[in-house]
Amino acid sequence: MSTTTRTNDAPLLEVTDLVVDYRNGRRSYRAVRGVSFKLERGRTMGLVGESGSGKSTIGRAILGLAPVTDGSVRFRGDELATMKRSQRRALSDQIQVIFQDPYSSLDITKTIGYTLAEPLNHHERLTREQTHQRIRDMVRRVGLPEESIHRYPAQFSGGQRQRIAIARALIGNPTFVVCDEPVSALDLSIQAEVMNLLAELQKSMGLALLFISHDLSVVRHISDDLVVLKDGLAVEQGSAEDMYANPSHPYTQSLLAASPVPDPQAQAERRRLRQAAAAGSHAPTQTPTLERI
Ligand code: ADP
């Protein structure tokens, strides 16, 4: 594992040969087996793969919530894996996270106003009025009425709660946000609304996002680049546009074929491709492209 070497032109996030082993007594399980990627400021990296492929583990390793067994995770050139807790705490206004289930990540006993004030108390010296103003602005920005600040999480729908979780992650002006399946628990129509909101905030705030999803159709519109994970390995990575147009790995092809599309005819064609992939035919007669299917 390498030590801290700050350089001014270092990428915002650089993950190199990351290995994560989970230990349970004397047994050890390798969840991530040497994954590398770079994320620049203001860009979005989609991390896709089916359940158990190691996506969340990578997000958690970056956040310091899973062990880095080998390799390195650098933020602006600084090694996160070996960073002291106090240094990491100082970075917590820069690095934020949005989880799948806002209900378990929000404190149900606190009002929304209180929840949104907390990150500001930790990181910024604002007057009481400035804090209130910032909270009201953020609540409006995520599309909720101002009076939401006096209410509790239980008084909101799932989509609204995820908007609150987004507001909490962004209120301290971070540069980088890990989004771990942020819309997977929501209805399809609400998913689209929350994705649009995230994309709009990403642009207007110049955020870098690591967007984790099992569903390629979810990350499609928001990602500049993609890493496709299978069994802890990156089987394909590169520009999202290229990968959609011409997925080279059979696993990427099958993920594409599995992502839901509203058109029944296209859905039938995807089903055919999925069945062909399941039958062991990894070379469909036509390369599946989103334009075609
Ligand atoms: P994904 O996010 O792609 O669904 P995860 O990163 O959650 O995958 O999990 C990758 C693998 O690591 C899975 O086989 C999972 O069972 C295992 N795993 C995840 N968390 C732990 C843990 N805390 N202890 C042991 N194994 C774990």
Image (cartoon, helix red, strand yellow):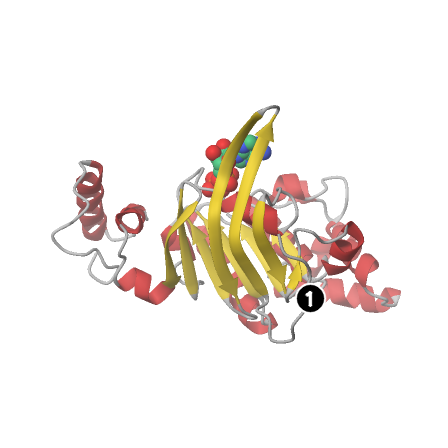
- For label 1, the residue is 173
Q: Is residue 27 left or right of residue 48?
A: right
- Quarter of the figure with the C terminus: bottom left
Residue 184 seen by the camera:
no
Against 233, residue 36 (above or below) is below
Q: Is residue 212 left or right of residue 243?
A: right
Of the pair 214 and 281, the residue shown nearer to us: 281
Please state the horizontal and vertical placement of residue 205, each as a whole percent of the image.
Answer: 61, 71
- Whether residue 81 is visible: yes
Q: Residue, x 54% and y 71% (percent of image)? A: 203
Residue reaching furthest to the bottom: 9
Residue 119, picture quadrant: bottom right
**Mark 1: secondary structure:** loop
Name the kind of residue labelled 1 in the image: Asn
- Work out whether residue 278 or residue 17 is closer to the camera in this orientation and state it: 17
Q: Is residue 116 left or right of residue 248?
A: right
Q: Is residue 112 above or below residue 67?
A: below
Residue plotted at (78% across, 67% down): 133
Residue displayed at 25% across by 61% down = 246
Name of the residue lying farthest toward the front:
2
